Image (cartoon, grey):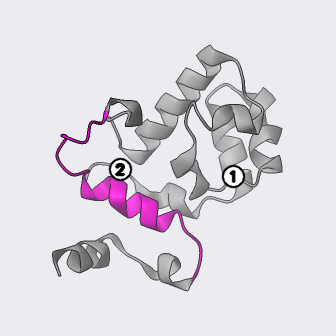
Amino acid sequence: MSTCNMEFLSWSCEDVEQWIESLGFPQYKACFTENFITGRKLIYVNCIYLPRLGITDFEDMKVISARVRELLGITETPWSRSIADPPRDSTRLFLEKKSQTGVQADGLTYQRFLDDMRQ
């Protein structure tokens, strides 16, 4: 697995609020809490999604998106993918599964995800 620390997956809305403030964007705390952005939902936060949250300053959007990718351990930007590219890495696929809610997603570990992929 990449060097990504999966702790953020258990973050509450308040944890995400503190994180966005720690990045130097206290003005956006309400944008995240009012939209119920938890650690799992951070997986979907990018420059396409940020305006829906009320964040429209492009420079801020670039920084926040980069910090989310850093948090997730993802260096690849979605718009640079081609259908000719090799399959996506297992970390990214795991994060997409963990972004869901429910008993199955809650109990999913990275090792179990890898084992299921091999079957």
Depicted 51 relative to depicted 30: above or below: above
Asked if the magenta segment contains residue 76, the reply would be no
Q: Residue shown at 57%/30% (left/top)?
A: 47
Residue 33: x, y in percent? 79, 49
Please give the range of residues in magenta. Answer: 81-102
Q: Is 68 positioned to the left or the right of 2 in the image?
A: right
Q: Is residue 53 visible?
A: yes
Q: On the picture, is 81 further left or further right than 67?
A: left
* Residue that badge 1 annotates: 37
Kind of residue sitting beneath label 1: Ile
Q: Which residue is mark 2?
A: 4
- Most extreme residue toward the top, as rendered? 59
Amino acid under disc 2: Cys
Q: How many other residues sit within 10 Å of disc 1, few (<14), some (14-19) or many (≥20)?
A: many
Reply above or below: 52 against 23: below
Judge whether residue 93 is colored magenta. yes
**Quarter of the image with the N terminus in it:** bottom left
Q: Is residue 1 visible?
A: no
Residue 12 rendering spot, x and y as whole percentages:
68, 59
Residue sitting at x 18%, y 40%: 84
Element marked by disc 2? loop
